[in-house]
Image (cartoon, helix red, strand yellow):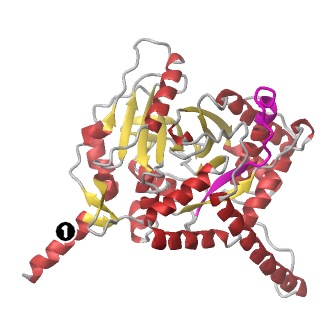
C-alpha cells in the first residue's frame, strides 16, 4: 500500500510541475512573448524525417516541450504532461511556385511577420517548427523554431537547441563557443595602499548612490516616465499586435573584436554602441520626412543574471536550476546629438561601455527583482505582467545578444549556413537581436511595419559599423555582407 502511494506521488509529481514566476509573467493576457529562431539551410530541405527527429531527439530534451500550462486547484499555473501530436506542431507553408530566389525574400519576411503575430495555442505544448522549402537570396531553405518565452529564455532555449543540433563536419564532436567576449583590466594600485583603500570607500559610496538612482529610474520607467515619440518609437497603443518587418545585417566578429580591443571593452559594448550611433544616423536622415522633436530615448539591454560562463547541458541546467528565465533589462539612455557628421563615432561606444559597466555593478537589478517578488505576493502574477509590459511600452527599443557556436551546425543532415533570432510580442516599435555564428555577428531588426523604414535603418547600421571601425582601427572596410 505504501509502495503504491509512493508510486502515485511520483507520477503526480512528474505529471504536474509548478511553473516558475517568470513563466507566469511572460504567458498572460497582458504580456505574451515568443522567440523565433531562424536557421538557413545550405541545401534544399527534405522534411521526410521531421516527425522522427522531433520525437526521438527534440522532445526528450526537456519535459516542457511535451507539457502544457494549466491552473491547479489554487489557481496557480503548473506544467502538465500532455499527449502530444507532433504533426500539429509542424507547419509547411505554400508559396507560388517557380519564382526566382529573391522573389521569395518578401514571402519569407511576410510569413515571419504573420507567425510573429499568431499566439501559440494553450491547449498544446508551446512550440512549433515552420519549414519553408522555397529558396531565398540567402538560403535554399529555411527552418524556423517558434518557442514561447514561458519555456525559458534565450540561454535555456538556445542551449537546448544546440544540444539537439550537431556539428556539420563531425556530429560526434561537441560544439564550441567563443571563449570570451570580455576584456579584463587590472588595477594599477597596490592592494595594501592607502590609495586603494580610499578608492574602495569611494566605490562603495558611489555604488550606493548609483543603486538608489538606478532603482528609482527603473521604477519611473515602469510607471510614470515615458520615452518621447520619435522615429523609432510610434507610441501606438497595443503596438505588439501590429505587423512587423524583419531584416538582418551581418558583421565580422573578428573586426568587432578589433574595435573591442581598442576601447578595452566587450563585444556587447561595441554592438550597443554601433546600434546607438546607427539610431542617431537614422534619426538625422528621417527628420526631414517626419516631425521628430523627441530627445528622450531609452534602450532596454538584456542581461543574463546567471553566475556562470558559457552554455550548460540541459541536465546541468535542470540540476543546478539555471533552466528557465533568468534575465533582467538594463535601461540605458540612448545618447542624442544634433549633428552626427561632427561627432566622434567612438563616443557612442564609450558612452554605452561606461553606462553598462556602472549599471551592472549597481544593486538596482537585485532591488527590482525583490520589488517584482513583493508585487507578485501582494497583487498576483498578472500585476507583474502589467509592470513588465509597462516597462517595455515606456521605452524605445530592446537589445538582446546571444553567443552561438563557432562551427557549422546541421539539422537532420541539413548544414546551416546562417542563424538569427528575435523576440516578438513586446509592446515596442523596434527590437534588435544579435547572435554570433561561425565568426560573424548577425543582427536582426524587427520593426513596426509602415512606421520604421527597415531598409534605411539597416543601411545606417552598416554605416555606423564602417565609421566606428575606421575611427578605431584606422582602416576602411571594403566589403560587408
Q: Residue at x 41, y 38 (%)?
A: 118
* Residue 375, image x, y percentages: 52, 70
Can I make out residue 41 in this image? no
Q: Classify mark 1: helix, strand or loop.
A: helix
Which residue position is annotated with label 1? 11
The N terminus sits in image quarter? bottom left
Which residue shows up at 38% across the image and 32% down it? 131
**Residue farthest right in this picture:** 342
Residue 12, image x, y percentages: 21, 69
What range of the chain is rendered magenta? Answer: 282-304
Q: Position of residue 116 (x, y in %)?
A: 47, 38
- Horizontally, residue 302 falls left or right of residue 361, namely left
Report the front residue among 135 and 221: 221
Occupied quadrant, residue 89 = top left
- Residue 299 within the segment the image draws in magenta: yes
In this rendered view, identify the residue nearer to me: 129 or 308.
129
Residue under the image location 40 percent in, 15 percent down: 96
Whole-percent x, y for residue 290 in the image = 76, 29
229, 424: nearer the viewer: 229
Whether residue 298 is situated above or below residue 37 in the rendered picture: below
Label 1 Cα crowd, 10 Å radius (few <14 / some 14-19 / many 20+):
few
Amino acid at each position: 500500500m505504501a509502495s503504491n502511494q509512493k508510486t502515485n506521488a511520483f507520477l503526480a509529481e512528474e505529471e504536474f510541475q509548478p511553473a516558475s514566476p517568470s513563466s507566469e509573467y511572460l504567458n498572460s493576457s497582458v504580456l505574451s512573448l515568443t522567440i523565433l529562431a531562424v536557421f538557413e539551410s545550405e541545401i534544399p530541405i527534405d522534411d521526410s524525417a521531421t516527425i522522427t527527429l522531433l520525437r526521438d531527439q527534440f522532445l526528450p530534451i526537456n519535459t516542457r516541450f511535451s507539457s502544457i500550462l494549466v491552473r491547479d486547484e489554487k489557481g496557480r499555473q503548473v506544467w502538465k504532461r500532455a499527449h502530444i501530436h507532433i504533426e500539429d506542431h509542424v507547419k509547411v507553408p505554400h508559396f507560388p511556385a517557380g519564382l526566382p530566389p529573391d522573389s521569395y525574400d518578401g514571402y519569407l519576411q511576410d510569413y515571419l511577420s504573420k507567425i510573429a503575430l499568431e499566439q501559440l495555442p494553450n491547449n498544446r505544448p508551446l512550440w512549433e517548427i515552420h519549414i519553408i522549402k522555397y529558396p531565398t537570396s540567402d538560403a535554399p531553405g529555411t527552418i524556423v523554431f517558434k518557442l514561447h518565452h514561458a519555456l525559458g529564455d534565450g540561454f535555456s532555449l538556445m542551449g537546448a537547441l544546440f544540444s539537439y543540433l550537431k556539428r556539420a563536419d563531425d556530429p560526434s564532436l561537441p560544439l564550441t563557443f567563443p571563449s570570451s567576449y570580455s576584456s579584463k583590466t587590472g588595477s594599477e594600485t597596490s592592494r595594501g595602499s592607502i590609495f586603494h583603500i580610499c578608492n574602495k570607500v569611494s566605490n562603495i559610496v558611489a555604488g550606493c548612490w548609483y543603486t538608489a538612482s538606478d532603482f528609482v529610474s527603473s521604477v519611473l520607467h515602469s510607471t510614470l516616465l515615458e520615452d518621447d515619440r520619435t522615429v523609432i518609437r510610434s507610441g501606438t497603443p497595443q503596438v505588439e499586435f501590429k505587423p512587423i518587418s524583419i531584416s538582418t545585417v551581418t558583421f565580422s566578429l573578428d573586426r568587432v573584436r578589433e574595435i573591442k580591443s581598442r576601447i578595452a571593452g566587450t563585444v556587447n559594448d561595441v554592438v550597443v554602441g554601433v546600434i546607438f550611433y546607427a539610431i542617431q544616423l537614422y534619426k538625422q536622415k528621417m527628420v526631414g520626412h517626419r516631425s521628430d522633436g523627441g530627445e528622450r530615448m531609452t534602450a532596454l539591454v538584456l542581461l543574463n543574471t546567471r553566475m556562470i560562463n558559457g552554455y550548460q547541458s540541459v541536465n546541468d541546467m535542470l540540476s543546478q536550476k539555471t533552466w528557465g528565465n533568468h534575465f533582467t533589462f538594463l535601461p540605458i539612455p540612448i545618447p542624442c546629438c544634433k549633428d552626427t557628421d561632427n561627432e566622434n563615432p567612438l563616443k557612442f561606444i564609450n558612452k554605452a561601455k561606461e553606462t553598462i559597466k556602472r549599471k551592472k555593478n549597481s544593486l538596482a537589478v537585485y532591488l527590482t527583482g525583490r520589488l517584482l517578488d513583493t508585487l507578485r505576493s501582494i497583487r498576483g502574477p498578472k500585476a507583474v505582467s502589467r509592470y513588465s509590459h509597462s516597462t517595455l511600452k515606456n521605452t524605445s527599443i530592446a537589445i538582446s545578444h546571444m553567443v552561438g557556436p563557432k562551427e557549422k551546425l546541421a539539422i537532420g543532415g541539413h548544414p546551416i549556413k546562417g542563424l538569427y533570432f528575435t523576440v516578438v510580442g513586446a509592446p515596442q516599435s523596434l527590437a534588435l537581436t544579435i547572435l554570433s555564428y561561425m565568426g560573424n555577428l548577425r543582427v536582426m531588426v524587427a520593426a513596426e511595419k509602415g512606421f520604421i523604414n527597415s531598409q534605411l535603418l539597416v543601411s545606417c547600421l552598416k554605416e555606423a559599423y564602417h565609421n566606428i571601425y575606421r575611427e578605431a582601427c584606422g582602416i576602411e572596410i571594403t566589403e560587408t555582407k
